[in-house]
Image (cartoon, rainbow, N blue to C red):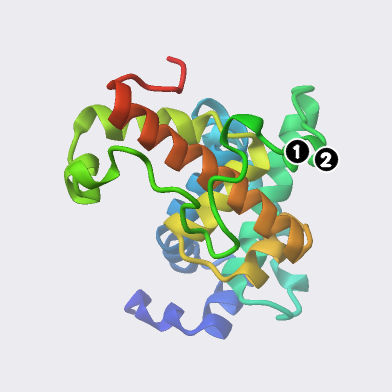
């Protein structure tokens, strides 16, 4: 039997409830990557695998009670986020939301309300964004910067930019208000674009090794 039948969400849920191995493998292939990205953005790469494994255990235990108030993916991602945040608390590295929303003075007010530069970087016109991002050094620098973002900022950026989720889904997954999601996203973008500007002007990376 082809596992394409599990593309239907109700069929996939029924398969997970009855512990169908094919349904489980399909779910891992479909949701495992996004779960890994989200977990890593909150707890870092080193323990992301453990968080995802814990999240799958929680998913399989609770899927029989899934009420369909959101998409299955959104529900699974919220479980993943909750497992990651719980792990942070156990590791005694949890950061208060108020701290994550605090203004970063080094990149304050660089963007307007639409996410555009207030004043374009001085050297911005000399290289196209494509040329900048083609630099392996810059890619490595940006990866380090994103990994070092405060937990909810990194998670918000990953969900929005890497996975393309709408703000409403991000709010549900991270359990924060839409206004807070917008602030978190704005702060994360500030830091990432500030990193690009600094690299372009100096050839050095703001993110630490």
The N terminus, quarter of image: bottom left
Q: Name the mark nearer the viewer: 2 or 1.
A: 1
Answer left or right for 13 relative to 95.
Answer: left
Question: From where the camera sits, is residue 209 visible?
Answer: yes
Answer left or right for 122 relative to 74.
Answer: left
Which image quadrant is residue 61 in? bottom right
Q: Nearer the viewer, residue 140 or 33?
A: 140
Give the x, y percent position of residue 72: 61, 72
The vertical placement of 151 against 7, above or below, is above
The vertical placement of 133 against 26, above or below, is above
Label 1: which secondary element: loop
The C terminus, quarter of image: top left
Which residue appears farthest toward the top when viewing the image?
Answer: 209
Query: On residue 64, which mark appears?
Result: none
Few, some or many residues within 10 Å of mark 1 (<14, 14–19, 20+)? few
Answer left or right for 209 relative to 172.
Answer: left
Q: Which residue is mark 2?
A: 98
Residue found 52% across the figure and 59% down from its top: 115
Few, some or many residues within 10 Å of mark 2 (<14, 14–19, 20+)? few
Residue contact between numbered discs 2 and 1, judged by CB atoms under 8 Å: yes
Q: Nearer the viewer, residue 87 or 183?
A: 183
Give the x, y percent position of residue 4: 35, 79
Q: Which residue is mark 1?
A: 102
Residue found 67% across the figure and 72% down from its top: 168
Residue found 45% across the figure and 48% down from its top: 119
Q: Nearer the viewer, residue 126 or 81?
A: 126
The vertical placement of 19 against 85, above or below, is below
Give the x, y percent position of residue 36: 49, 45
């Amino acid at each position: 039997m082809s596992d394409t039948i599990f593309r239907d969400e109700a069929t996939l849920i029924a398969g997970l409830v009855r512990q169908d191995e094919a349904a489980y493998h399909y779910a891992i292939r479909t949701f495992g990557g996004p779960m890994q990205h989200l977990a890593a953005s909150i707890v870092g790469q080193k323990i992301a695998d453990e968080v995802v494994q814990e999240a799958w255990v929680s998913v399989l235990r609770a899927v029989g009670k899934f009420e369909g108030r959101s998409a299955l993916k959104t529900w699974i991602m919220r479980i993943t986020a909750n497992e990651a945040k719980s792990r942070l608390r156990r590791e005694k590295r949890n950061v208060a939301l108020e701290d994550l929303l605090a203004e970063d003075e080094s990149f304050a007010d660089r963007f307007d309300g639409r996410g555009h530069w207030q004043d374009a970087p001085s050297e911005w016109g000399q290289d196209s964004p494509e040329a900048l991002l083609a630099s392996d050094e810059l890619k490595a620098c940006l990866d380090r910067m994103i990994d070092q973002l405060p937990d909810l900022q990194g998670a918000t950026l990953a969900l929005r930019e890497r996975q393309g989720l709408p703000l409403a889904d991000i709010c549900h997954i991270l359990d924060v208000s839409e206004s807070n999601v917008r602030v978190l996203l704005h702060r994360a973008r500030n830091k990432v674009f500030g990193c690009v500007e600094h690299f372009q002007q100096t050839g050095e990376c703001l993110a630490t090794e």
